[in-house]
């Protein structure tokens, strides 16, 4: 029995998101940015490419870079108050996390060309 059309579209979108993740990973490693996850499961559909910077200042520099180049580089979503208040490493890790966009509407070849031309 054939898979429903919606399932096929979701599978195609997930494949594209994984491909975009790989493009960001290769680029990030050349920029000396550490991927949060070097490898991802072959069934996932990532929403962003998260990476570690060395400091909050470096994260801010990447946010500025994204703004200058019209690329939606953003922080991880806001942490729950409980994590921030209890003095865990969560807040410091949050400050060092930057997220690069992954949308199935992004053409992989266009993304590769665009970020390859930027410094």
Image (cartoon, rainbow, N blue to C red):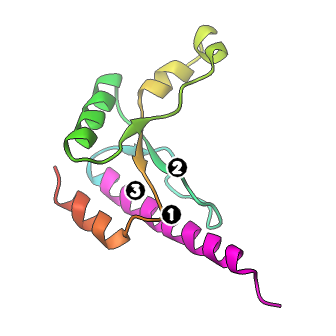
Q: Is residue 10 magenta?
A: yes
Q: Is residue 44 magenta?
A: no
- Taking 61 as reference, is 99 above or below it? below
**Which secondary structure, mark 3?**
helix
- Taking 116 as reference, is 5 above or below it? below
The 10 Å Cα crowd at callout 2, few under 14, some 14 to 19, many 20 or more, is few
- Please name the predominant secondary structure of the magenta segment in the image: helix
- Taking 96 as reference, is 7 above or below it? below
Q: Which residues are magenta?
A: 1-28
Which residue does the numbered mark 3 point to in the structure image?
Answer: 25
Q: Residue at x 55, y 69 (%)?
A: 13
**Quarter residue 57 falls in:** top left
Q: CA distance from mark 2 to mark 3?
A: 9 Å
Which residue does the numbered mark 1 point to in the structure image?
Answer: 17
Horizontal and vertical percent position of residue 87: 59, 10
Which residue does the numbered mark 2 point to in the structure image?
Answer: 37
Looking at marks 2 and 1 on the same chain, the residue that comes earlier in the sequence is marked by 1
**Which secondary structure, mark 2?**
loop
């Amino acid at each position: 029995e054939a898979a429903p059309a919606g399932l096929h579209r979701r599978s195609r979108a997930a494949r594209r998101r994984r491909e975009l993740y790989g493009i960001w990973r290769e680029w990030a490693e050349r920029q000396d940015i550490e991927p949060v996850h070097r490898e991802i499961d072959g069934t996932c559909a990532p929403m962003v490419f998260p990476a570690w910077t060395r400091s909050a200042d470096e994260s801010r520099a990447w946010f500025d870079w994204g703004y200058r180049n019209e690329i939606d580089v953003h922080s991880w979503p806001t942490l729950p108050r409980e994590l921030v208040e209890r003095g865990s490493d969560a807040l410091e890790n949050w400050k060092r996390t930057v997220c690069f966009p992954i949308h199935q509407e992004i053409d992989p070849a266009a993304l590769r060309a665009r970020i390859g031309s930027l410094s």
